[in-house]
Image (cartoon, grey):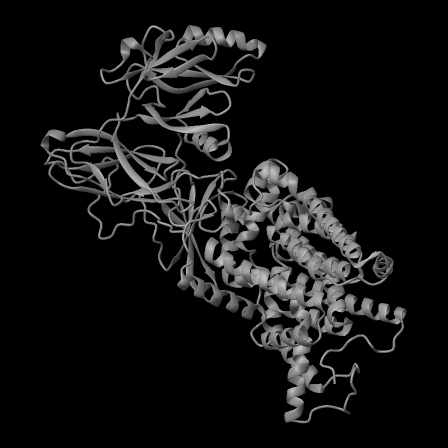
């Protein structure tokens, strides 16, 4: 008796078509019903889903920026789904984005059943394809991914369509269908670059496909009369031409994306142009702030201030401290890669904007000097005005009131845009003794430029001292940073007020925190100017994050550690087992082995083996070279494209059980559709195994507190509040600007800080107050704490 039920049931073509339609309708209806139920019961979406929604929101504003960060296919689908939803619900909201995004993903899952069923019918017959897809629909984790904001099923829609078209093309000799395979692979590449594997399958198929039937057989018979060599050459040329057409079709949608992103490599393997600066969260017991932090210490006592800092990209950090005048702030210098002009700003917001979004135009040159933002900070400070010329793509700076008025008069013709005073410096007559000049140079070819080092020699350009500022100096004697801790033991001669600047750098970008340290007399009270107890040595010091990777900028730099490879294999096998809920994995492996060994043709055997090897290789490669991820998610493609062999494995097990114990009706003849009762019992066991987890557990209910925290923030914070958060879902549901962090929050820019901790909050920083707490979710002992401080200007 055959282990696999093939469509040999005596039905005519119309009856088989009606039967297939009925099966598909049942599968798609069940899939949609389960998906809608999971969407309704979803407490919070995945963290990746927040990123995809953010990319979809940015797509209409900055499509090039989106392409540089991530393939735009899935964000575009979410954007289109949101636009359709807006036709029925005009009021925009995060909930509308979430539900429309989940609906798009579910629609892709339902539509993916069409090519999957067609492919399964060609491989194992309609009946086996139906049973296989029924199991796939009921598997909990693949179902969860199809009702969340994840790109697994949109990617699988294109991948399964391409595999079906490829198998059909190779088995019936329709070479023109390879163009559809290439186009499908290109569109799928815009969702996940792994879809390019279709090209590899097609090339392998062209190599192993036998002489085709139909028109190809007639051509072969004609070629037989002209000789075997001519026939072979014609066949090679046809297949070569089909391959080239397929590659061209693939390049059609991919080429614009590659041009916009600057690389054909997946975003995980290329150097990101967006390098965020390090985050200084706290110095000693005080949260970092835009203003200088004040501390007090007595002579001959040690001041120890641990610096809590981390880098968003996980780069190693370096620490430095310099002496600066009190009330001064760093002025950052940039150089235009287009015009060569310089740009200076004292604003942290402007600096971050250029570093993050305009790095291709403005190159960071470091801290140029120190100036003030407050004209009343010291006597003699005068504003430095800034203008911008759209025509010349340059800035102009001046401290002269008369020059300012003259430029303003000229700007009536839109030659210069006035941007106001950008910082405050000194004139010649009011400058302190330790101030240095910033010289303005004129060149007939390049216009004005500014520098603290004037040129010398007979060919030097004419220059004048435009204004005076301060340069950083060496820290006070005895002060320094060691292992992320600022230590200083002042002596009696160092009494007074000392300004310092802590500079934390990841090698490319710096972050700064100003300090004002009061060295008080020996008899003074042990309080700093803010009324807080002076910091003492800490029992433990946490400095910075150190992230050791096997790759740097996408280029492999180390060999594969065997231990890591073994761990990756274990993770991959475990992820696939969890997708299958463990028990169905055995019949899947048995059926796959049996069919490929005993029944499959050459094309099917090569195609399925390539799918298994390539997808396992992609999963292992991601674990080893990119980093641990969700193997359950990355295994869905492999499972969906090979699950058609699971019924054959059930038949094998049913046959073995039937030999041990009679549990069947009348013996079935070879090739019949009737199956052993053990087959249906095993199928029911799989369904019973999957149903409780699929339907009785609300999706991510254990993290329902994230949504509750977001709702509290939405109702109790101003609309322009900035939320530092360890999980982006909080700001999404809060409808507020989020400031993500992993280890230390950016307390300089945040109005509220959200912390997830076991028990009491760990963030005990001066000036911050806990205003709300909520449990993360049932079965989780962690609590979400929300801290707040009054917004700091500047």
Residue shown at the point (87%, 60%) measured from the top left = 218
Taking the image as shown, residue 483 lies to the left or right of residue 242, namely left
Instruction: Give the image quarter of residue 528.
Output: top left
Total tally of numbered discs in the picture: 0
Residue shown at the point (10%, 29%) measured from the top left = 493
Q: Which one is nearer the viewer's eye here, 502 or 614?
A: 614
Q: Which one is nearer the viewer's eye here, 163 or 277?
A: 163
| Position above or below: 631 against 248 | below
| Position above or below: 352 against 766 | above
Does residue 628 appear in this view?
no
| Percent position of residue 442, x then y | 42, 9
Q: Which one is nearer the viewer's eye here, 602 or 82?
A: 602
Q: Which one is nearer the viewer's eye here, 578 or 763?
A: 578
Quadrant of the image for the N terminus?
A: bottom right
Taking the image as shown, residue 387 lies to the left or right of residue 35, namely left
| Percent position of residue 623, x then y | 48, 58
Residue shown at the point (55%, 46%) measured from the top left = 265
| Position above or below: 99 against 114 | above
| Percent position of residue 656, x then y | 64, 87
| Percent position of residue 717, x then y | 49, 43
Quadrant of the image for the C terminus?
A: top left
Does residue 718 appear in this view?
yes
Taking the image as shown, residue 292 lies to the left or right of residue 704, namely left
């Amino acid at each position: 008796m055959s282990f696999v039920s093939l469509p040999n049931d005596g039905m005519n073509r119309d009856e088989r078509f009606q039967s297939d339609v009925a099966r598909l309708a049942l599968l798609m209806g069940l899939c949609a019903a389960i998906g809608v139920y999971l969407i309704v019961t979803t407490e919070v979406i995945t963290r990746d889903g927040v990123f995809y929604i953010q990319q979809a929101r940015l797509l209409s504003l900055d499509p090039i920026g989106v392409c540089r960060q991530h393939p735009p296919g899935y964000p575009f689908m979410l954007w289109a789904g949101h636009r359709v939803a807006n036709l029925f619900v005009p009021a925009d909201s995060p909930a509308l984005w979430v539900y429309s995004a989940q609906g798009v993903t579910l629609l892709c899952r339902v539509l993916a059943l069409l090519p999957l069923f067609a492919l399964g019918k060609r491989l194992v017959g309609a009946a086996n394809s139906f049973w296989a897809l029924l199991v796939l629909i009921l598997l909990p984790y693949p179902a969860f991914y199809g009702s969340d904001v994840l790109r697994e099923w949109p990617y699988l829609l294109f991948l399964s369509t391409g595999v079906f078209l490829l198998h059909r093309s190779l088995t019936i000799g329709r070479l023109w269908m390879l163009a559809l395979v290439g186009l499908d692979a290109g569109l799928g590449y815009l969702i996940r670059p792994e879809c390019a594997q279709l090209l590899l399958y097609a090339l392998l198929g062209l190599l192993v496909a036998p002489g085709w039937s139909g028109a190809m057989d007639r051509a072969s018979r004609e070629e037989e009369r002209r000789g075997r060599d001519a026939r072979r050459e014609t066949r090679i040329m046809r297949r070569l031409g089909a391959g080239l057409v397929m590659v061209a079709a693939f390049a059609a949608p991919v080429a614009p994306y590659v041009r916009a992103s600057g690389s054909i490599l997946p975003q995980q393997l290329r150097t990101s142009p967006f390098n965020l600066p390090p985050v200084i969260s706290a110095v000693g017991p005080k949260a970092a702030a835009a203003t200088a932090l004040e501390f007090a210490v007595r002579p001959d006592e040690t001041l120890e201030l641990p610096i809590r800092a981390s880098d968003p990209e996980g780069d190693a950090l370096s620490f430095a401290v310099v002496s600066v005048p009190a009330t001064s702030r760093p002025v950052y210098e940039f150089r235009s890669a287009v015009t060569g002009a310089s740009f200076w700003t004292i604003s942290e917001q402007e600096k971050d904007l250029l570093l993050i979004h305009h790095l291709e135009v403005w190159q960071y040159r470091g801290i140029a000097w120190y100036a003030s933002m407050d004209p009343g900070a010291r006597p003699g400070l005068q504003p430095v005005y800034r203008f911008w010329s759209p025509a010349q793509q340059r800035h102009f700076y001046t401290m002269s009131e008369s020059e300012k008025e003259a430029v303003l008069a000229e700007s009536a013709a839109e030659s210069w845009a006035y941007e106001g005073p950008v910082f405050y410096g000194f004139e010649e007559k009011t400058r302190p003794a330790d101030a240095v000049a910033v010289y303005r140079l004129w060149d007939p070819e390049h216009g004005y430029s500014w520098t603290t080092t004037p040129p010398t020699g007979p060919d030097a350009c004419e220059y004048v001292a435009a204004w005076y500022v301060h340069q950083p100096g060496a820290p006070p004697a005895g002060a320094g940073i060691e292992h992320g801790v600022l230590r200083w033991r002042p002596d009696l001669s160092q009494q007074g007020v000392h300004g310092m600047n802590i500079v934390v750098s990841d090698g490319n970008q710096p972050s700064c925190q100003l300090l004002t340290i009061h060295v008080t007399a020996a008899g003074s009270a042990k309080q700093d100017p803010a009324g807080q107890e002076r910091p003492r040595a800490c029992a433990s010091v946490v400095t910075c994050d150190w992230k050791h990777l096997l790759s740097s900028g996408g280029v492999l730099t180390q060999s594969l550690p065997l231990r890591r490879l073994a761990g990756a294999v274990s993770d991959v096998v475990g992820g696939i087992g969890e997708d299958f809920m463990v028990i169905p994995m055995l019949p899947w492996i048995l059926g796959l082995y049996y069919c490929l060994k005993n029944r499959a043709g050459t094309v099917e055997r090569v195609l399925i083996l390539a799918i298994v090897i390539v997808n396992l290789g992609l999963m292992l490669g991601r674990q080893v070279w990119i980093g641990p991820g969700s193997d359950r998610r990355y295994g869905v493609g492999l499972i969906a494209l090979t699950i058609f062999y699971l019924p054959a494995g059930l038949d094998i097990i049913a046959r073995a059980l039937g030999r041990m114990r009679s549990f069947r009706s009348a013996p079935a003849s070879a090739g019949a559709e009737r199956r052993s009762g053990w087959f249906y019992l095993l199928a029911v066991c799989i369904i019973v195994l999957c149903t409780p987890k699929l339907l009785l557990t609300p999706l991510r209910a254990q993290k329902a507190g994230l949504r509750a925290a977001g709702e509290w923030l939405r109702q109790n914070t101003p609309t322009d509040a900035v939320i530092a958060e360890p999980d982006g879902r909080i700001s999404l549901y809060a409808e507020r600007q989020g400031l993500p962090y992993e280890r230390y929050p950016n307390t300089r820019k945040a109005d509220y800080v959200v912390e997830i901790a076991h028990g009491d909050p760990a963030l005990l920083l001066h000036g911050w107050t806990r205003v709300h707490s909520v449990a993360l979710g049932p079965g989780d002992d962690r609590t979400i704490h929300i801290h707040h401080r009054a917004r700091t200007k500047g």
